[in-house]
Amino acid sequence: MTYTFDAQNPPVHDGEITALEELLDAPLPANYKALLKYSHGGEWPIPVAPYDFVMFEVDTVIGNLTATDFAEAFPGLLPIGGDGMSDYIALDFTGGGAAKVVGVDAVESAPEDAVYPIAETLEAFLEMVGQAPEED
């Protein structure tokens, strides 16, 4: 995939990808691994809520899965970033097939009300990265 946004950090080390895959006991999607190898973290605008994509480095993803209740509260979701405030951006594997990209409102008390759609696929989401929201 050709990205329309600039890399902000060096690529991830293969050992970090392996550590995350071992924790998940599953391979990461190829397009997510490619993204990590393009830029291991960074911050870019997106034109839909939550309007910023702060991409997590792998150690932050692992920390969110092991040191918080994220995995218990949101099974089937992989937190790949956030908005820099209270929302996560996650890959949603609950529907089968290609992962969707969803937002997770971390301050919403009911997990079933916290998840909202961002993009139908990671590819569609990545096409939005770097695009500023339209001003009213």
Image (tube, helix red, strand yellow):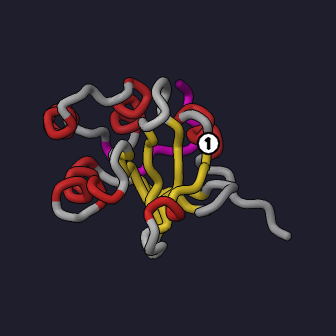
Rendered position, 110 above or below 39 = below
Viewer-nearest residue: 68 or 13: 68
Q: Which one is in front, 65 or 84?
A: 65
Q: Main secondary structure of the magenta part?
A: loop
- Regarding residue 41, the answer to whether it shows in the image is no
For label 1, the SS is strand
Residue 22: x and y in percent read 14, 34
| The magenta stretch spans residue 110 | no
**Which amino acid, mark 1?**
Ala
Q: Residue 79's spot in the image, x, y percent?
A: 37, 51
Can I make out residue 107 in this image? yes
Q: Is residue 14 above or below residue 54?
A: above
From the image, tell me which residue sits under label 1.
Answer: 119
Residue extent of the magenta highlight: 1-10
Mark 1 surroundings: few (<14), some (14-19) or many (≥20) residues within 10 A: some
Please identify the quarter of the rendering in which residue 49 is found. bottom right
Q: Between 119 and 110, which is closer to the camera in this rendering?
A: 110
Location of residue 28 by image quarter: top left
Q: Residue at x 39, y 29 (%)?
A: 34
Q: In this image, 70 relative to 103: left or right?
A: left
Q: Say if 115 sits above or below 78 in the image.
A: below
